[in-house]
Amino acid sequence: MMNKEQYLASLRKLKPVIYCNGRKIESVVDDPMTRPHVNSAAMTYELAHDPEYNDLVVATSSLTGREINRFTHLHQSTDDLVKKVKMLRMIGQKTGTCFQRCVGLDALNATYIVTHKVDKECGTSYHERFVKYMQEVQEQDLMIAGSMTDVKGDRSKKPGQQADPDLFVHIVERRDDGIVVRGAKAHQTGMVNSHEMLILPTTNLGPEDKDYAVACAIPVDAPGVVHIFGRQTNDGRRLQGDIDTGNAEYAIVGGETLTVLNDVFVPWERVFMCGEYQYAQEYVETFAAYHRQNYGGCKVGVADVIIGATAAMAEYNGVPNVSHIKDKLIEMIHLAETMYNCSIACSAEGHKTEAGSYYVDTLLANTVKLNCTRFMYEISRLAHDIAGGFIATLPYEADYKAPETRPYIEKYFAANPRIPTEHRIRMARLLENMTGGTALAESMHGAGSPQAMRVMLYRETNLEHKKKLARKLAKIEQ
């Protein structure tokens, strides 16, 4: 298992092509726009060597029997699924943001299940290839970017019907030594500070879309790969100081990119689906359920920080014991724990797959994420309510530090006489950055839009069984 410093050193050896705000990033470890995201991912490596968190962050490989980082683990029990959620909440509490390795973990576990099924039914050898790749991932403790979401183009059309065929990643050439893929993946969390990406299909496919049924592993710095770093709320503040940034050490969300694949070659040993279109939807749904499981862990860890910051702001404002403030804090706690309960439930209700690994309860996993699309917004609204409007209208950090204006800001933004003004300003900036813009949009659309969860809830709930229960009680014979 790598530690933090080894992870940073491993990133320095890579040479990905990354553009950000009209310039090229030469080192993700050192560039101020990407360093906070590196720091948050590095926490997943650092904690693996902390004895206090060994039970959560370290697992035993089902492939080699060796100790590995849980972010490279194939779940072997419902206890593994529960520990995953607890681990995500704990790291969310420590970083206050996305630490980016969950997507890759979910893509690995989904691929393990789907390749086993494809091999069984089609006589292919994808699963054997993937197990060998998985051993490499575990032995080297690689950070994998799970790459599912295509740019999609015209949403009313299937991949093969698009005016531009490159709007979904697809195979453009099959060779004796591998395949060549072209297209782009969007919203790629943690991509620039990962070691490799695991490409997955993004939607259900028909026979005419078979070239879009592709899964493969690609180094982030492979020839033909170009990353364009996405803009985030208040990202320019990283260049101006630390107070206005709010969470200067770990940024706000996951450093998403648009990742372009310009005729990228992939050797056969790293190809895990190649044309088996009939399994694409199951692949998507398996990955999505795993990923939606996470949100009651990582997002609740972030919510814990928001609740703590809000309670601190109430204290700093001098009103910690006012009844309506307490009521709102209680509501925030209730919403957070409800999300967490769903994640624990979908994990505890998981089951063993034919591949031998464990999978979450799909219905409950989708319930987790649908709750997050609402509850994180409500938690943020209540935080704004309690903290007060000045979190949106504070002067610049530079004015706070300037000798001409600092005395005025110190004097007029003081509240509770026991609390330094700077503490009140810093806490306000943390809340501002954690409860607005990019962070909330990720709560809404990360792991799929709300409608995707509703579709799965309707599909998985078994209405016929519920109608049967009602008919029996009503004494209605079918």
Image (cartoon, rainbow, N blue to C red):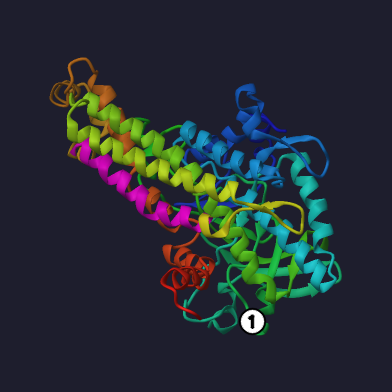
Compared with 365, 164 (above or below) is below
| Nearer to the camera, 429 or 445 | 445
- Say if residue 428 shows up in the picture: yes
Q: Position of residue 53 (x, y in %)?
A: 61, 27
Q: Position of residue 355 (x, y in %)?
A: 77, 57
- Say if residue 16 shows up in the picture: no
Q: Which residues are magenta?
A: 365-388
**Which residue is pictured at 53% across the width and 44% down the height?**
344
Classify the position of the N terminus by image quarter: top right
Dot 1: element: loop
Q: Amino acid at mark 1?
A: Gly
Q: Which residue is under mark 1?
A: 206
Q: Is residue 124 magenta?
A: no
Taking 280 as reference, is 30 left or right? left
Q: Position of residue 173 (x, y in %)?
A: 75, 75
Q: Is residue 383 magenta?
A: yes
Taking 101 as reference, is 446 left or right? left
